[in-house]
Image (cartoon, coloured by chain):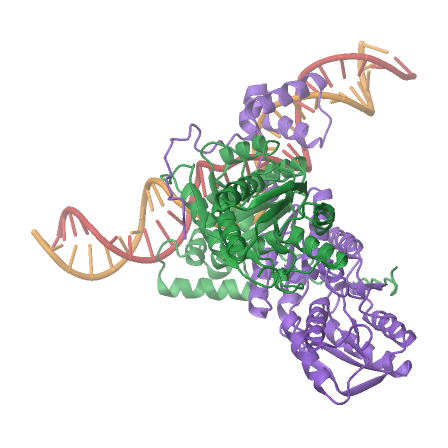
Chain colours: A green, B purple, C orange, D red
Amino acid sequence: MVSSPVVPVTAAPEEPMNAVTISDVARRAGVSPATVSRVMSASRPVGPEVEARVRLAADELGYSGNGIARALRTRRTDTVGMVVPSILNPFFTTLVDSLESALHGEGKQLFLCDSRQDPAVEADHLRSLIERHVDGIVVSPVHDTESAAAVAASARAVPLVQLDRRVDVPDTDWIGLDDAEAMKLVLTHLADTGARSAAFVTSELTNSSTTLRLRGFRHWSAELGIREVRDGVVLGDYTVDSGDAAARRLLASDDRPDAIVCADDLIAMGVLRAARELGVRVPDELQVTGFDDIVFASYVTPALTTLAQPTDRMADEALRLLSLRGTPGGAGGGARISFAPRLVRRQSTR
Amino acid sequence: MVSSPVVPVTAAPEEPMNAVTISDVARRAGVSPATVSRVMSASRPVGPEVEARVRLAADELGYSGNGIARALRTRRTDTVGMVVPSILNPFFTTLVDSLESALHGEGKQLFLCDSRQDPAVEADHLRSLIERHVDGIVVSPVHDTESAAAVAASARAVPLVQLDRRVDVPDTDWIGLDDAEAMKLVLTHLADTGARSAAFVTSELTNSSTTLRLRGFRHWSAELGIREVRDGVVLGDYTVDSGDAAARRLLASDDRPDAIVCADDLIAMGVLRAARELGVRVPDELQVTGFDDIVFASYVTPALTTLAQPTDRMADEALRLLSLRGTPGGAGGGARISFAPRLVRRQSTR
DNA sequence: GAACGGTGGGCAATCGATTGCCCACTGGAA
DNA sequence: TTCCAGTGGGCAATCGATTGCCCACCGTTC
């Protein structure tokens, strides 16, 4: 297991943990801590000669400030918490990346929390973030109903915006995709390419976007004259294996669909795999679509037709809303901002 | 772009931001703040009757404590920072997940930082983490030399362990994979399956594991009688496209290798894609191996033979080392712990 | 009945910054 | 000469917890 033996040779650290404070700097510069503070934060003008002395002293001592003390006094931590159902899902990975990037631009740091699809873990993380006095929380709630209480409580304590998934909490901002529009894009595309029947593979309907996507699928397939095959809606979860299993069931039926529409790319990848192993040619015999446009969607064979989400713009918008709510006169909640998806055509459809 | 218009209906929040403090609880329970503190943290026994009163008061007020104030006093934030080259790389995503999971078990939170392959961004994040007084830092340095200064400076201020990649900083702990052993496993496997020649595709040699893997490749291919083809080492970066390009070059040569060994799974996926598009059959005409066993390695076709890393164990070990260094008498640095990789055989080799 | 140890509670200092307020000084206007 | 505004600096309170120390009280033990 451990191939190199551990040999921690102890060496006495010269400075156990250097803790140079604002007073140290002040003393060395021959001024008061107040002045040092004003120089470092430029919160009030300071004489040029004094300023130079302070900066020199700070450099010499390697002073870097104590964010904890500052946060206590200013009541701002320059910190944002993000809670996602699973960081291993590439869509959320992308969302995390977008948010981290946006935050770094503002000099803030990200507390990343993975709720592991578990409302209890999620509640735990939310409580912890509040206790740490983050300036805001971005959350993609795990469950339609079981997440509601914790989300509502958190929103009362700190600016909060829901991203992607949402629970019904009054006066809470939400940012996500227009799921109905997404389904319209997909089904229109399938109708154009000649699909006459379709199935929909998704996860259990315990969260908002899942429900909306199914509704969109039903609405637009009816609208566009695409018939939903018998037992044409399969519920599982957002994994490759789940998609694989669903596809085997659908393809074994005597009412095979022309197209399988999937609620996310992982499911679609499972469908593609099953089709390949069963010798069903995609897109000739079966068209397949995904959702999210994760980076691997373009690497599978055939490359997956899917819907892209503007995650960077969504992250920016989330931060904008958080800072609005952070200011005293900031707008109240209840905003619902949905972005338009973009259809990315690849080889899994005609 | 925004399909639903933003209509933030302002509603005056009843409690702008409730900030119930320990003194509030103390007052309501008719005790001193000290007693409340002792009840909440169980740091000293308290009479059962008083304890009940305090708990009741805390519940009624919804008291949750102020982590900032506590951190200032105790000098512990229960917070760990992690800095990775790119969260979008699935291997690091897995590492992040493992660490987040381990931290949650200890009631700590994770500051996630993405250095975007840029030593300057990396240094920025490290500085910020120090300023926030994290209890420890886990870093996978971007660059062999350019990351060194910032890593060394950080290690002086706070317990720090390097994970996966490493720079040469004295007295710093490192946890990673035994790269030489990994290459031995791969090449032995290839030798067993009859490969007589091979090429190695990797990224620019600007970080430690990359260098070690190349060295291992050379050592073990020589040892096992596998010939390195002409121009058989191709440098690019850790991306699918880079692997694709490298494979096209190697397959166009008149000295085609029997096997292409890749320094990570993304590169290998690119190689597989190129082979497929060029009509080169894998594994019959060409064997391909990856590195890391990212989750998608099993989803591509043919499924990728690769090397798995025990990321959960690595994360646990990292935290153990951090807490050691955190305690006053804790071991000094300089430990290098390398875990043994596991060969995962799939369809891309015979 | 004196001495003593254990228990349970409070006082107040402390962590390291920020900031409202006060004051000294300067130069210019009246 | 007097007054005033503007500038630059310091004092000390403050943010919300934790914790060393002290003390009152109680029951034991010789």
Image quarter of the C terminus of chain B: bottom right
Does A309 sit above or below residue A75? below
The answer to whether residue D30 is left or right of residue D6 is right
Residue pushed farthest front? Answer: A254
* Residue A99 screen position, x and y as percent: 53, 54
* Residue A311 screen position, x and y as percent: 51, 55
Q: Residue at the spot x=67%, y=71% of the render?
A: B238
Q: Nearer the viewer, residue A30 or A117?
A: A117
Please identify the quarter of the rendering in which residue B222 is found.
Answer: bottom right
Is residue B239 visible from the viewing direction of this image?
Answer: no
* Residue A94 screen position, x and y as percent: 58, 56
Count of labels shown?
0
Is residue B343 visible from the viewing direction of this image?
Answer: yes
* Residue D18 screen position, x and y as percent: 65, 37
The answer to whether residue B41 is left or right of residue A74 is right
Q: Nearer the viewer, residue A312 or A280?
A: A280
Does A130 sit above or below residue B83? above
Please identify the quarter of the rendering in which residue B54 is found.
Answer: top right
The answer to whether residue B155 is left or right of residue A168 is right
Q: Residue at the spot x=55%, y=20% of the render?
A: B28
Q: Nearer the viewer, residue B220 or A322?
A: B220
Q: Nearer the viewer, residue B266 or D8?
A: B266
